[in-house]
Amino acid sequence: MSGKLDGKVAVITGGSTGIGLAAAQEFVAQGAHVFITGRRQNELDKAVKLIGRNVTAVRGDAARLEDLDRLYQTVERDKGRIDVLVANAGIGELAATAEATPEHFDKIFAVNVRGVYFTVQKALNLIRDNGSIVLVASVAQYAGIPGFSVYSATKAAVRSLARSWAAEFKTRGIRVNTLSPGPIDTPIFDTLGLPPEQTEAAKQQFVADVPLGRIGRPEEMAKAILFLASSDSSYTTGTDLVADGGLTQV
């Protein structure tokens, strides 16, 4: 049985854990060869073993331009093109505005905005006409969340980039869309700097707030990314697909 991405070449940044890893697994299952990136070699090695086939791991930080150059040099050498680009690498960090440091601000923007911008810019000579670009944003852009002002602003910027690029790349037939996940059970919860009991409390609060009554799963986001990446969304560009269990919609 043919897959929705048969013979396609895909690049997924932040593909070693969470949503990126689930998307890589789904893409390979649908017939693609996937290049994944991540900052930690041990996590990349685990991801490659889990995915099992048709995957190439390139260690790198999306905020480092030399790492992006090395990624695309590898893609060009091995496959010569990109059909689907998923800019998924991102970080979150809690900080009240009164206590936020310039280092906190610069760190989050460096990965979530600068990293996304140059992930796309540096891929343009490899992306085929009529290709698909998916940017992973967040429903945080729609909600006022205490302690998340910088993170939320970066995700609003990602949404804005998708609109601009959808208009800019239309002459090449390249579609650009964003996915805005709600609370998803990924390692990002562990990066917020909260004690374990507060992390669990935050998860339970999301469960109470989400109309569907649960936190989302990475594989559900992977299906949404597949929709935006494949010909199933052939008449969709510049849009934001919200997948949040109804959190911001009801």
Image (cartoon, rainbow, N blue to C red):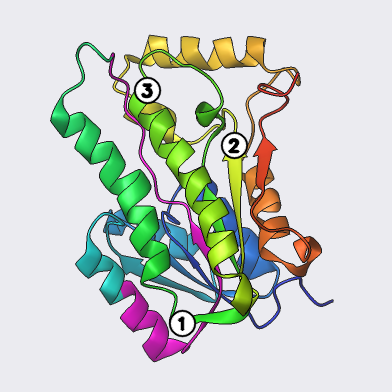
CA gap, disc 2 and disc 3: 17 Å
CA gap, disc 1 and disc 2: 27 Å
Mark 3 Cα within 10 Å, few/some/many (few <14, many 20+)? many
CA gap, disc 3 and disc 1: 35 Å
N-terminal of the two: label 1 or label 2? Answer: 1
Please identify the quadrant where the C terminus is shown. Answer: top right
Residue 182 on image: x %, y %:
59, 30
N-terminal of the two: label 2 or label 3? Answer: 3
Mark 2 Cα within 10 Å, few/some/many (few <14, many 20+)? many
Instruction: Give the SS element for disc 2.
Output: strand
Label pair 2/3, CB-CB below 8 angstroms: no
- The residue identified by callout 2 is 181
Above or below residue 202? Residue 191 is below
Left or right for 26, reference 146: right
Residue 211 on image: x %, y %:
74, 17
Residue 169 location, quadrant: bottom right
Q: Nearer the viewer, mark 1 or mark 2?
A: 1
- The residue identified by callout 1 is 126
Q: Amino acid at mark 2?
A: Pro
Decide which of 71, 54 is in the foreground and name it: 71
Decide which of 141, 49 is in the foreground and name it: 141
Left or right for 184, reference 116: right
Instruction: Give the SS element for disc 3.
Output: helix
Instruction: Give the SS element for disc 1.
Output: loop
Above or below residue 108? Residue 222 is below
Residue 208 on image: x %, y %:
65, 9
Q: Amino acid at mark 3?
A: Ser
The magenta stretch spans residue 130: no
Magenta region: which residues?
71-96
- The residue identified by callout 3 is 149
Q: Residue at x 29, y 22 (%)?
A: 193
